[in-house]
Image: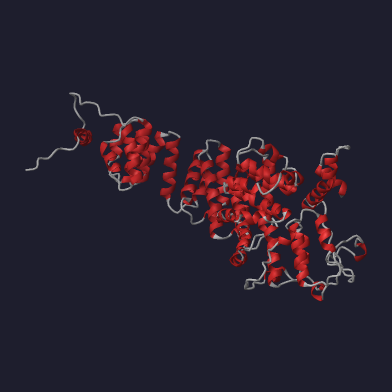
Amino acid sequence: MLAQAASAQQEPPIVSGQPDEIDRLPGELDSFVQDAINEGLLRPAKPQPAETPASPVADQPAENVSPQDIRPQVTETAEEQAPAEPAATAQIQVEYLCPETSPYDFAEFSDFTSYGDLAQWRGFLEGEERTTALGRLMAKAYLSLGMIAEARSEIKGDYGQGGVALRLLTDLLDRDTRPDLSFFRDVASCAHADGVWLAIGQLKSNDANGADLLAQHFADFRALPLRLRADAAFIVIPALDRLDRPILSERLMTSFTAEEFAQSRELQFVKALQRLSMGSPSAADDIRGYLRRAQYRNEAASALRRHGKAISSELEREIVDYYINELGNLPAEASVSENLDLILHDLNSAVGYDLTLRLADVPAAADPESRERLAGHFEDMLDEDLQSDAFLINLKAMDALMKGEALLADRAGTEARFARAAAIAANLGLPSMSAKLSERLTHDAALALAQAELAFRLKDDATLARLLEENPDSVAIRKVALIDAINRGDRAAFNRLVRGIPEDVDTALMLIEADAAAGHWVVPQRFYTIAARSGDEETQIRALRVSDARPAPEPPTGGEIELTDVSSRLERLRESLGPIPTEVR
């Protein structure tokens, strides 16, 4: 196992004859062991009681206890020898009473940087009786060195306020658990310095308020023991990158020295993330080096995708699969907002129809907010694929539409998408598919409109004319035909079709913008006037922008004027004259 860890780390060899390299050996060895623990290649030794044969870890017999264990040799209490409580029991809710000393006071361990510091400190505890207070003190010592599992074991069975506080802190530092923000608010209300933990918890939950709060607690962050600060940075820096707060990330990085960066792979990784957020050209290559390490891979891949850097589609899908499986193990009441942000935003190119539907089946994603986000992502993919001219992409969208019917139920636009897909299927010569899609429609008008829109997109004037004739009362189809006439510059067809069309602001704006896009200028002046007189400021601006692009009317010729053009020409003439002065008597 040690050989595997050594080969995985690939640390540079020490060159003999260089005293400074020899002096750095203990620190590098300590960093090596810590990295091996973090990556699962080594497991910290579980402290064993001297007078109790039973081991707290079932698969570690007492005879294997190392005689070099430097933990204080104490007898476990009956409570610690009892079977582990159910997980739910550990979440006992207690009213937090402000203590004289904060459970998160790490001042005693501020200089801890290595296991040697721990060994020296524990030497002073020899002969101390095993008490709840000693267990909590040991837990804080282990947390100061980033040893979360060891810290948890020290407070196992401790459901007092201090024990609960430390257990929730280990949950905060554990990358796979969600923080109890309510508890950290209570703690922060008692001790101002403990607001740093609330800030870290908020950032872990992707709450932007955590960034502002952490900025206020920079001094408290900087005062944390080195390894504890590094663990917090591993949570905070990626979160700040997601929230686009590079300046705060850069400031936090100043709390570490160059030597500390050199001795910690974890700090080197968060530094690379911080450099990527600042736009460093070489940062992406540095982060790619961490894709081969399980401890960093997901965060590294997400950061690269977030900044527009390519990663292999296989790796991206593998990471999405991992997150979906992890979400599937969460209880229904768990919050998945942060995970959905990462999956649907940072890794969105790998989240196709099937993976989106898998996410929708996760119990923890059944809340209305999560369903809304997943359905919106699904609809965006459908709309893009239904607009494609590629047969296979259209077919994939049709299949997904039928599979995702439950996710899209009762949502605005769902029937229109089914109608559009049915129309495309019929046009592609897939009558059975078109029939299946049409079965989901409650109104035939939706299918007719979808067919008209498809005919317009395909420039199939004959089909559009037929649909217009078959649906003479459909204002929606007539509007499609009007846009078609505008695009063709067919003024006569426009004047014929516009009769009976509602002359409201939205319709007028649609027509004049289509007129400007086509450049044939066949829309009468009255529609420009209707749009410009809108009570909505944004609509007025859009209308005036189009009017400014419209060429001035040509001077009238001696020829005859069509009756339908009379009102339009009179309006243009009146506008060209400007306001008519009035005489005041």
Residue 292 position by quadrant: top right
Q: Nearer the viewer, residue 450 or 53?
A: 53
Q: Is residue 255 visible?
A: yes
Q: Nearer the viewer, residue 115 or 462?
A: 115
From where the camera sits, is residue 485 visible? no
Relative to 518, 91 lies left or right? right
Q: Which of 271/290 is in front? A: 271
The C terminus, quarter of image: top left
Q: Tell me the residue at 87%/63% (across/down).
A: 60
Q: Quadrant of residue 128?
A: bottom right
* On screen, residue 554 above or below 515: above
Residue at x 90% of width, y 60% of height:
68
> Vertically, is 355 above or below 68?
above
Q: Position of residue 556 (x, y in %)?
A: 20, 26
The image position of residue 358, as x and y in percent, is 63, 53
The answer to whether 409 is drawn above or below residue 539 in the figure is below
Q: Position of residue 225 (x, y in %)?
A: 72, 56
Compared with residue 61, is residue 562 higher up or lower down, i.e. above or below? above
Report whether 445 appears left or right of 355. Answer: left
User: Residue reaching furthest top?
Assistant: 558
Residue 427 location (% of width, % of height): 49, 39
